[in-house]
């Protein structure tokens, strides 16, 4: 299973490496540990222009269990713990949770991808869940003193810029949009390789094939057990 996870993660890594809104590297050439930077390209976001570094750690049985996500520099946010970890449904183990009230549809499932996690984290930054905060003080400040909260967000944003690698050119909303237009103009065909243009990454089809192969393998094992 670890070999299958390794292949899937490498495919995802290669696909995400082409995106403008994230900058990723393998930690010590280990495909199960990624250094990730989320780059906020939405000009309407309080976090626009930020370069937010995090670490992604994947289990050996990925994608059946979710990765672990942790910001290197903790952000002052209702759903981010002081240690940089997140309280977000997509990172919770599969299945319903009666204690939290989360349904299986809200939580991790094997059809999820790293891209799904990163997009969910970006969405969470601007749309926090204040009813069950990981950082109670941040939740209270957001509700009662929104202007003070915004100032702390700006402070975190400026701190994040200190992590921008030397020589790295930060994309903007305009440059990212222009690049997408150029890619679209380059190839207007409806081939499988163009799945990225319609909301997915290039490796999605390969990953689905990996998943199908894994499930078929498990089914064959079950049949063998029945014959015995």
Image: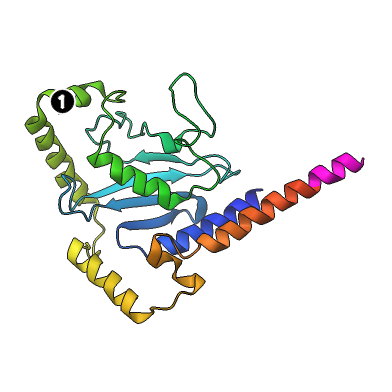
Residue lying at the far right of the rendered structure: 228
For label 1, the residue is 143
x%, y% of residue 47?
19, 46
Q: Which residues are magenta?
A: 221-228
* Left or right of 178 in this view: 85: right
From the viewer's perspective, is residue 213 above or below residue 158? below
Quarter assignment of residue 101: top left
User: Viewer-proximal residue, 1 or 200?
Assistant: 200
Residue lying at 43% horizontally and 60% vertically, measured from the top left: 200
Q: Is residue 172 visible?
A: no
Residue lying at 59% horizontally and 51% vertically, measured from the top left: 5
* Left or right of 140 in this view: 148: left
From the viewer's perspective, is residue 25 above or below residue 88? below
* Left or right of 210 in this view: 104: left
Majority secondary structure of the magenta segment? helix
Quarter assignment of residue 79: top left
């Amino acid at each position: 299973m670890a070999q299958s996870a390794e292949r899937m993660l490498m495919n995802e890594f290669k696909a995400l490496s082409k995106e403008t809104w994230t900058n990723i590297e393998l930690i010590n050439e280990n495909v199960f540990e990624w250094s990730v930077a989320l780059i906020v390209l939405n000009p309407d976001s309080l976090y626009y222009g930020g370069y937010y570094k995090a670490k992604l750690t994947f289990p050996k049985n990925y994608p059946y269990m979710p990765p672990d996500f942790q910001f290197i520099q903790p952000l002052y946010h209702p759903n981010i713990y002081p240690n940089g970890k997140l309280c977000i449904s997509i990172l919770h183990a599969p299945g319903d949770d009666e204690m939290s009230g989360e349904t299986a549809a809200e939580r991790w499932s094997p059809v999820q991808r790293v891209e799904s996690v990163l997009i969910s984290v970006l969405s969470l930054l601007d749309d926090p869940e204040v009813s069950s905060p990981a950082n109670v003080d941040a939740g209270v400040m957001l509700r009662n003193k929104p202007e003070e909260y915004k100032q702390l967000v700006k402070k975190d944003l400026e701190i994040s810029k200190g992590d921008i690698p030397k020589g790295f050119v930060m994309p903007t909303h305009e440059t990212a949009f222009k690049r997408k237009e150029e890619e679209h103009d380059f190839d207007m065909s409806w081939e499988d390789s163009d799945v990225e243009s319609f909301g997915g990454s290039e490796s999605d089809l390969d990953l689905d094939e990996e998943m199908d192969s894994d499930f078929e393998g498990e089914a064959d094992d079950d049949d063998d057990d029945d014959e015995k």
